[in-house]
Image (spheres, grey):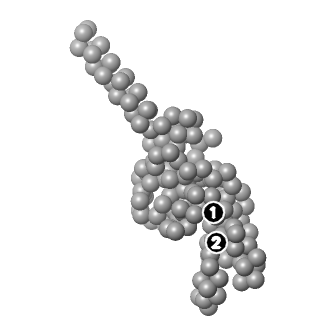
Amino acid sequence: MLITKGLIIDEPWISKIINGGKDWEMRSRSSRIRGPIGLIRKGSLQIVGVANMTNVSGPYDNEALIDNTEHHTIPSEMFDEPDYKWRHAWELADIKPLAEPVRYVHKNGAVIWVELDDEAVDGIARQLNGESTSSYLAEETAVKIETVVTLENT
């Protein structure tokens, strides 16, 4: 399973998702995207977790938001505001923090979704397959050193 898309999420919401306290990311519109995604901490250029986007529901009125507070964790005084527009729940499951954040290349114009570059896709895959980035880099460095030594001896 390769994760090729990342969802940009601001604080404090990204930390609540990563720490297991929130499984709905509230947005102003629906989305057709489903499946495995990277979770990006806004402004950090880092993917800090992964999740499976299973469904989009809503729009929710204030009463329904109150009934589902445990999913979105938004205080009612926020959605009581007349200009509150985040009424669609992007439902997340199988949320996992990454042991080490993975850097990605942020393309101009990416505001909600990011198409992840190959290095970021590989970095996530290595962690999900049980390899830490540091052990991968150490292994890669050892291969380069071995190659140089071999070339020098030929």
In this rendering, would 73 be left or right of 115?
Answer: right
Residue 145 position (above or below residue 55): above
> Please, what secondary structure does the residue beneath circle 1 have?
loop
Determine which quarter of the picture holds residue 149: top left
Amino acid of disc 1: Gly
Residue 67 position (above or below residue 10): below
Percent of width and height locating residue 133: 44, 38
Percent of width and height locating residue 152: 23, 14
Determine which quarter of the picture holds residue 69: bottom right
Closest to the observer, 151 or 21: 21
Q: Residue at x 52, y 68 (%)?
A: 12
Q: Residue at x 58, y 47 (%)?
A: 3
Percent of width and height locating residue 88: 68, 73
Q: Is the residue marked by circle 2 packed among few (<14), some (14-19), or many (20+) residues within 10 Å?
A: some
The residue wearing badge 2 is: 73
Q: Earlier in the sequence, mark 2 or mark 1?
A: 1
Quadrant that contains the C terminus: top left
Q: Residue furthest bottom?
A: 82
Q: Is the residue marked by circle 1 packed among few (<14), some (14-19), or many (20+) residues within 10 Å?
A: some
Q: Which mark is residue 21?
A: 1
Q: Are marks 2 and 1 in contact (CB under 8 Å)?
A: yes
Count the numbered circles shown.
2
Determine which quarter of the picture holds residue 140: top left
Amino acid of disc 2: Thr
Q: Residue furthest left?
A: 152
In this rendering, would 115 be left or right of 153?
Answer: right
| Real-space CA distance between mark 2 and mark 1, rounded to the nearest whole angstrom | 8 Å
> Please, what secondary structure does the residue beneath circle 2 have?
loop
In this rendering, would 122 be left or right of 154?
Answer: right
Q: Residue furthest top?
A: 154
Q: Residue at x 53, y 39 (%)?
A: 127
For the question of whether residue 51 can be seen, the reply is: yes
